Amino acid sequence: MDIETPPVYDSHNNSLDESNINQSSSSPMSPRRRLAIIALIFLAAVGLIVGLTVGLTRPNTPIANGGSGGSNTVDEEEPVDTPGGENDGSADVPGTDEDVSSPTEPIGAPDDQTISQLTFQPNLRSFSSDILSGYNDCSVLVQDIEETAKYLVNILIDNNVRYGDEEVIALDGEAPMDAAPSASQGKSSYGTNNQVENVDEADIVKSDGTNVFLAYGNDLVWMLTNGTIVQRLTMPTRKDSFPSITHWDVISSSSGSSGGGGSPEISLSSVGMGDFWGPPPQRIAGLLLDESNGELNVIISYYSYFEFKFVSGHMTATHTYSYDDGSVGLTLKKEMIHKGQYQTARFVSSQTHVVTRTDIDTYKLRDAMGRYNYPGMTDDQYRDAAYSRAVLLLPKYSKQLLAELISDANGVVQKDMCSRIIGISDMTDGAASRDIDDDPTYGSGLMNGFARTVSFSSSSGADEAVVSGAFLPSYGLEVYANEDYLVLAGQGWMRDPTSWSYLDYTYLMQFKIGDNIGDGASPFAIGSVKGRFLNQFSIDEYNNYLRVATTSNAKWEYDDKKATW
């Protein structure tokens, strides 16, 4: 430890360092005087030892959720918040909303003699069927997001002590940009090459045998099978205006208010707009045809420039048009906006299921933990200060993130909006031996994105759409569907607890499709298998068994028997 001590005291071994005692004397010293001086030195040393011992002992400081080990309990009488903090019936959890902007003197800066090794002790459910029950109250999900963030904060603080601020600059959870859909070839004169019978998959060309609908960039072309063009329609440019959500009111260190050097803030909505990266243009990403009702669902992928704090700006819109014999043309019946980047869509038993994925960007939380916000501090002082600040920030982060993901048109998260969201888990079976404050996966993490399934009937109103979803501990997303289930699959990796090697795994989430129109999809089963899958055709169902074909790569690890790598 870097502790300033008198020259006569060795803080590392709690002993007197006789070499530092000034023994140069101009005259002999009497035995009585020598004994008196030794006694004074001894008393001074004892006093210093007692002082250091008191400095190392701290009261049991409550962690961010107010408990000593984390808890998912909710006070039902706790008032609820609007985006600005007012009570209107939305979900909330107990927690301070005081301003925790980057201060000139970092919040929680300890006294010079206060030494501690504070760390969060997250508390999440294990990976089991318990997480399928969803959340009857969204405030419980807010707490689970906070518990998950504790793993990240522990790692950030530890890495910032070991390596400086290198870890803060990395942006996590960013999936590849919007890629063009893969081409499908008809198995008959006009049908889509669907994986499962009676489950229609979205494609950029759809036909009922008479009419042909084609997506061409942002244009929809309607033509007949004889080549006659009936109509060409350009999709209107989306200009969203989302409500402002202000749970996270922290000023970035880049504004100069931190009192330290600061690191330039990175915003996903502005990085590289000129020379490096720009958002993909709006385009039609898929079409679904409801022949029985004469309706066409047009799925539009676009990017919103709204300044979200913790999620990416990729968005999806669906326009439902009715079509006739060509005498009237396409008629818009309804349109909806779904947050997240379009992944795929299915039409099953008169219900449309659109799947999107939202990337989670934790840069602002990482930035708040940056070492540059705590200038002139020792490692132990930085740990103490960063932990104290995180206790205040994590409730704000969790509320802001959930509101940006699922809030209604007014920016409010209603308490019953999370009942179809699979619970967040620590991805362990609960029996693994590990440090509770470490990332249990030692790999791709616990919360990289949010998968959303929006289910609706083409003939029903927009208010009847049913949303289900899950937070992803993995990357990428593929979908397998049959008439009864939707299966979402993502790829991740974690460290083998018995070795230093890393293992690929596939995370599976199964949602049951309701029997009636409007039932949507509900969490039904979860699982993980070793290895990585190729695409949706690596998954199918046979005799009520879900089958997954995966590949495991060769591992580089130390072989104890051969005593070699």
Image: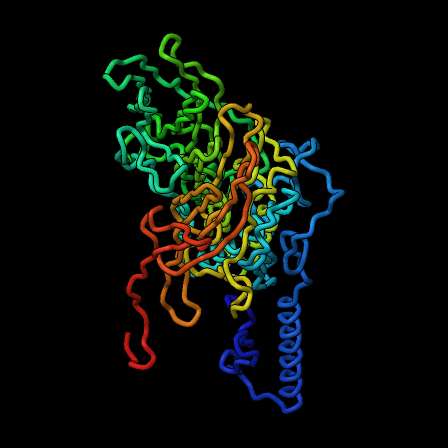
Q: Residue extending furthest right? A: 77
Q: Residue at x 44, y 24 (%)?
A: 292
Picture quadrant where residue 464 is located: top right
Q: Nearer the viewer, residue 355 or 367?
A: 355
Residue 118 visible in rendering:
yes
Q: What colouring does the structure picture have? A: rainbow
Q: Is residue 68 above or below residue 421?
A: below
Q: Is residue 49 above or below residue 400?
A: below
Q: Residue at x 43, y 40 (%)?
A: 357
- Residue 41, percent across and down? 62, 80
> Would residue 541 appear left or right of 1 to someone viewing this image?
left
Q: Nearer the viewer, residue 80 or 353?
A: 353
Q: Residue extending furthest top? A: 327
- Residue 447, percent across and down? 48, 49
Quadrant the C terminus occupies:
bottom left
Q: Nearer the viewer, residue 122 or 72?
A: 72
Q: Is residue 235 above or below residue 70?
A: above
